[in-house]
Image (tube, grey):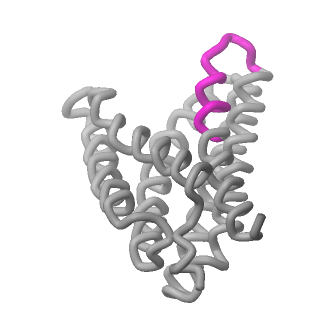
Amino acid sequence: MKLHRKKAIIVGALILFAYAVLASAVTDSKIVVMLAEALSGFGVIAIAIIMFPFFTPYGKKTSQWYLALRGIEGALLIVTGILFLISSTSSLKLYDFIHLYHGYVFAVAAFFFYYLLYRSKLIPRWLSIWGFLATVMLIIVNLVEMTGLATPSMFLYFPIILNEFVLAFWLILKGFNPSAIA
């Protein structure tokens, strides 16, 4: 199996892993929640490191921004895991604050991610466009939540979650577009 095929499978698996680990954090166990947040953070960082060489030919600065933003996103997840474990009133307030802004870091990094996927043609363009549009919805949800004007519907999170699952399965089953790598 070619190296780029293995990397596509790893990235797809890491996307699923990050979501599965976060979903498993719905428990009363502080250790499980802390580990889930931290492992998800490491997964996010690993995805960015693997994708960076694929993206660099399509925009070195953009690729560097993507890598930096995913690094920040991963670090925020690791920090929130530690804060949840501490569970003091101030640490839980900071946890909530970081989680709110984590959504923006995720969305901006996703813009770079889907932009670079679109430019590189590593995946079908429709999947990149879907991801890009889903990040717009995510930013709207985060703005509504931050302003307190309304409680956002979980329905608005669905497009990005579904997109990332489709992307993950695409990468695992089909891999990167071989002509884009050549």
Residue drawn at the location 54% of the way across and 43% of the way down: 98
Compared with 60, 92 (above or below) is above
Residue interval drawn in magenta: 18-30
Which of the two residues, 39 or 31, is positioned nearer the viewer here? Answer: 39
What is the total number of numbered labels drawn onto the structure image? 0
Place residue 159 in its image quadrant.
top left
- Queried whether the magenta region covers residue 24, the answer comes back as yes
Residue 5: % across, % down: 68, 64
Residue drawn at the location 66% of the way across and 79% of the way down: 53
Relative side of 62 to 23, left or right: left
For the C terminus, the quadrant is bottom right
Residue 61: % across, % down: 53, 86
Compared with 31, 95 (above or below) is below
Place residue 80 in its image quadrant.
top right
Which of the two residues, 55 or 87, is positioned nearer the viewer here? Answer: 55
* Residue positioned most to the front: 1
Residue 86: % across, % down: 76, 27
Compared with 180, 176 (above or below) is above
Place residue 1 in its image quadrant.
bottom right
